[in-house]
Image (cartoon, helix red, strand yellow):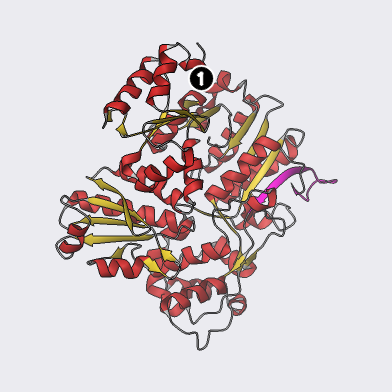
Amino acid sequence: MQHTSHRVKLIVRKDSLSKLDDNIWKMYSRRIQVLMADLTDILSLRNQLLDVDCAILTATSWGGEQAFQVNVEATFQLFNYLPKDCHILYFSTASIIDSSGCLLEEAYRYGTTYLQSKYVALQRMLRYHSHRRITVIFPTLVVGPNSHLANVSSQITPWKGLLRLIDLDASAHFIHAIDAAKVITYLVDFNPKPSFYTWHSSSDPPKKLPAVILGQPYFTADQLIQSMCSSSKKRRFFSIPRIPVLSLLPPLLIARLLSLFGATVDPWVMYCLKKRHFVYPDAVAPENFGLILIQMGVEAFLTFIRVTWMSSTLLQPIHSEEEWKQLCWTEQGWKPSIIGFGASWSQPCVHVREVLETLASVALERGRSLVFGFCEVEEGNSFATAWGITNVPSVVLSRDGELVNVLQGADPPTITRACRDFMEDCHLSLNERLEKLVHRQPIMLFMKGTPDKPLCKFSRRMIEILKGEGVIFGHFNILADYQVREGLKRYANWPTYPQLYVNGELIGGLDIVEELYQAGKLKEELHLPG
């Protein structure tokens, strides 16, 4: 939504709306229409689909009885209701094709119901819909806040000592969910000429559909193991012979061996053990389209795996200012930090700690270099006092060794929003942060306090004028960030607050806005209809 001007219709299941970020609704409510329906009941939305120019089909069932009903029948019912010239971006999975894009028969023969249903859907698409504007999206291994890689941490940790003794001959690709979204946005906006196709060998000549495989350059299992060894400072003196040896063993024996480690071995797992290399030379990532803001490259991915798999927590225990300095100070300067303060016996503090754990995982996935920590105030009372902490739970944000903001109370949405904004800003220079802030919304007000609670008479009067004119605007509390407060004065060459911006350009302070308002020219200056 930040990088396009499209109007969006979201088809969401009932009761799943709360999962959407609150910021989306505040910033883009005029461009988003929510349609409550299950994919299997798409008939009720038939008339709502008549004006759709581009459809991004991500809904899926991951298995069980509904797999074929949702992934095949409901999907093609939706196809039939979309306009004939609609560009359809259909999400499949790279597991069902080989490196040339040909449908993989083994995916249907050995695969789970999820893979089988995806196979049948693509087969039918090639047979009956190859004339339509369809681009098939094949994600590889997806990394995200609730990714499978993050969730298997507890399963991997007990065996990390044994893993370093195994030499695994296997490889695959990955893509971060944010990078995948960037590529999809590009495909929607520019619809580039296809360079890769998916096809089925059963037809002669084979019918094809344009396709995109989402994936960074492949990584190897050996890289992951070596990365974990480096993290734990454990050397690999020797390794058990590579996994091809397993292909010489009877499947039943392999199943029994892996079951000792708690693994369930089905036909698809056996096939993957034999195949081992899921590599696609035509896999693309944002940089292949000239999009340089890559969220996660191979090195960041290996770091994410190393820290996630080797640690039971991503929060560093901090009890003193000295410990904090040791974590945050490097030869290159201060690392930004997010530190929680609480008590283990307090349930609100436990909730805040869980929020910070999630944020730390997100920061790691995005390659952000921040220190996340937690201080038990009963053990680190002096450290809490140094930051002015009088109530728990609290969260302290610091940059360049200086306090940026203190978040008090167990308010997960507010903490999450503030910390996410802080994390995104930390990798930017001050001027880049200011440039981003003044463009955050078409009309931006930098003030003391918030619109609901202005903390000076000038900000209060500015709010009265804007609200009186019915102006929709974004705001930033300059008292919550010293760097922004001082930096924006130099950036705009304007020494006082509040400051009002339109499309990134400074209109002025209260005096100028008051003058425009009294002259009846304020809406014209803000590019609003009179």
- How would you rate the neighbour count of disc 1 (Cα within 10 Å): few for under 14, some for 14-19, many for 20 or more? few
Residue at the image point whose x is 34% and y is 56% from the top: 357
Q: Quadrant of residue 88?
A: top right
| Vertical comparison of 241 with 456: above or below | below
Answer whether residue 137 is magenta in the image. no
Residue 483 percent across, percent down from the top left: 38, 48
Classify mark 1: helix, strand or loop.
Answer: helix
Question: Is 354 located above or below residue 451 in the figure?
Answer: below
Residue for badge 1? 525
Residue 80, compared with residue 155, is above or below; it is: above
Image spot of residue 79 (x, y percent): 64, 30
Which residue is nearer to you in this view: 240 or 338? 338
Query: Can you give x and y, in whole percent of width and height, for residue 144 in the image?
Result: 48, 52
Name the residue located 36 percent from the left edge and 18 percent from the top edge: 465
Highlighted magenta segment, given as a residue range? 196-214
Residue at x-position 40% and y-position 64%: 153
> Can residue 452 be seen in this snapshot?
yes
Question: 299 or 498, which lies in front?
Answer: 498
Q: In screen coordinates, is 242 left or right of 381?
A: right
In the picture, measured across the screen, residue 120 lies left or right of residue 222, that is right
Q: Nearer the viewer, residue 59 or 361?
A: 361
Residue type at tag 1: Glu
Which is nearer the eye, 145 or 116?
A: 145
Q: Quadrant of residue 417?
A: top left
Q: Position of residue 139 (x, y in %)?
A: 60, 51
286 w.r.t. 173: above or below: above
State the residue lying farthest toward the bottom: 237
Q: Is residue 91 visible?
A: no
